[in-house]
Amino acid sequence: MPDIPFLKHAMAVDDNLVKIRGLRFGYGRGRLVYDGVDIDIPRGCVTAIMGPSGTGKTTLLRLIGGQWRPTAGTVEFDGVDVHRQGRRDLYALRRRMGMLFQNGALLTDLSVFDNVAFPLREHTTLPESMIRDLVLLKLDAVGLRGARDLAADALSGGMARRVALARAIALDPEMVMYDEPFTGQDPISMGVLMRLIRTLNDALGLTSIIVSHDVAEVLSISDQVYILSGGKVVAQGTPEAVRGSTEAHARQFLDGRHDGPLAFQYPAPLLAQDLGLGAVS
Amino acid sequence: MKSAWQSLAGLLSGLGRATLFLFQLLAATPHALARPRILIRQLYMVGTLSLVIIVVSGSFVGMVLALQGYRTLSGFGATASLGIFVAFTVVRELGPVVTALLFAGRAGSALAAEIGLMRATDQLSGMEMMAVDPLRYVVAPRFLAGFIAMPLLTAIFSVMAIGVAGGYLIGVSLLGVDPGAFWSQIHANMHPLDIWQSMFKALVFGAVITWIAVYQGYHAAPNSEGVSSATTTTVVASSLAVLGLDFILTAFMFR
């Protein structure tokens, strides 16, 4: 095979934009969040990462974005190992990703317009007139063109996430990561966001990763689902396949049962013992 | 209970991290000059918004100095030297030091709280994910603004304390010191080197206070307690650093 970097890269390109292999990650001593996780994020699809609170779903997005480093394993974005990049190359990779944070993470000293224009002004040399047009188009896509002059801290939670979504797609990224996009949203905002995520993914040819524990909403707009629990993938596949999963952790999560492999009670001594009632066996 | 060794090790490792952060900050500072609008906004935030407290404090410090100085000097029949007494005290010591302590309390705490809140609300993480370095965009302009603002605020404090509403007002208008003697004593005895040394102190204090403030804010735990702790630590550490550095600088300057 001729030693041509482009050819090598083209041959290496597969259907998965993100490939995670043997991922291990923990906080401090003893608290292992991921214990050998393999995940593939196919190009052009909406992939949901689900699981109970505290399973490290947001952590996964930060690992994919290179903000945190895994203890072991690899995270590849378009064939490039995210955690083997220098700062400059990592930032170049991040320009191809967009991320919607749980609280929007809008810059509170800027207006809605300036928030969306922020990545364009930082990373392009486009004239201000063109930036204005692009920002208005992005804001129009999320239905907030009319809110361009509002201050970022004057927005409701739903509006802030839509502005953050417009900002996340400002540079036309290949992939957008959504961190709990539906948490705390009223039904109208939730419906709007769900439709936006699906529509933007299809219209712009994006790859989307949604981290959430809103089962019904996420399953209805996803092409592929992973359910994580106890540091491992406990179910994966299409929404239909996952709905029919018989794995105990997945079943408990999907059905919202309080009893199952995940105990409702945090490990503790017997209540009677804690209250000083009766004999301790 | 931490042992003394653990506390010392913690202090040293903290100093090491802060020093590394300073190097990163200095490397990012030229990029702040490329964003003059942000720099000007930060100059307004840390400089202009500190003006009221600086002007009022400068005036009162000057007035008290004039009262105390007049009382002391009148015992020697040397009230004509009131001007230079106030001027030396303010320019050499109280100007840079009191301004720095006030600056730490107003601007330093605000910087730490603002950056800490940006950390807590994922604004810094959001920038990192947009491939924008928060050190260049957020931290460096604030550091540079503090560095620039402190000497200017010190100059304003000194002018207020000596002339406009402080020493001159009390000494000349109230206590009847001859205005010609007041100014001529200053003119004859105050050297440009005194002023340059005062400005040098202000520059050092400004750099140290803003360094501590942005470091504390940037590394604040992302919760309300973390922001509160960063703010408190900024004011306490900055104040102690200013007083300690003032002693060292004074020892070298006025040998």
Image: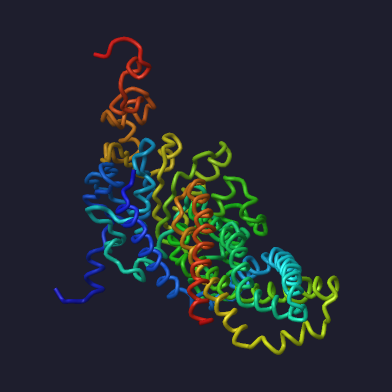
Q: Quadrant of the N terminus of chain B?
A: top left
Q: Which residue is at the front of the view, B153 or A272?
A: B153
Task: Tell which residue pokes out farthest to the left in this image.
Answer: A1
Residue B151 vs A232, above or below: the answer is below
Which residue lies at the image location 62% right of the left edge and 63% below the top edge?
B102
Percent across and percent down for residue B161 are: 72, 72
In this rendering, would A132 be left or right of A35? right
Compared across the picture, whether A19 is left or right of A221 comes to left
Residue B218 screen position, x and y as percent: 46, 59
- Up the image or down, A108 lies above or below B190; here it is above
Q: Position of residue B132 (x, y in %)?
A: 46, 66
Viewer-nearest residue: A196 or B178? B178
Image-based side of B238 in relation to A239, left or right: right
Can see residue B210?
no
Q: Quadrant of residue A116?
A: bottom right
Give how far across and how far down residue A41 sits, in percent: 32, 51
Question: Could you tell whether A10 is left or right of A189 in the image?
Answer: left
Query: Is A106 situated above or below B67?
Result: above
Label count reads: 0
Which of the 4 quarters of the picture holds residue A85? bottom left
Closer to us: A172 or B159: B159
Q: Residue furthest front?
A: B76
Q: How is the image coloured?
A: rainbow
Residue closest to the far bottom: B188
The residue drawn where x is 65% and y is 56% is A151
Residue B252 seen in the figure: yes
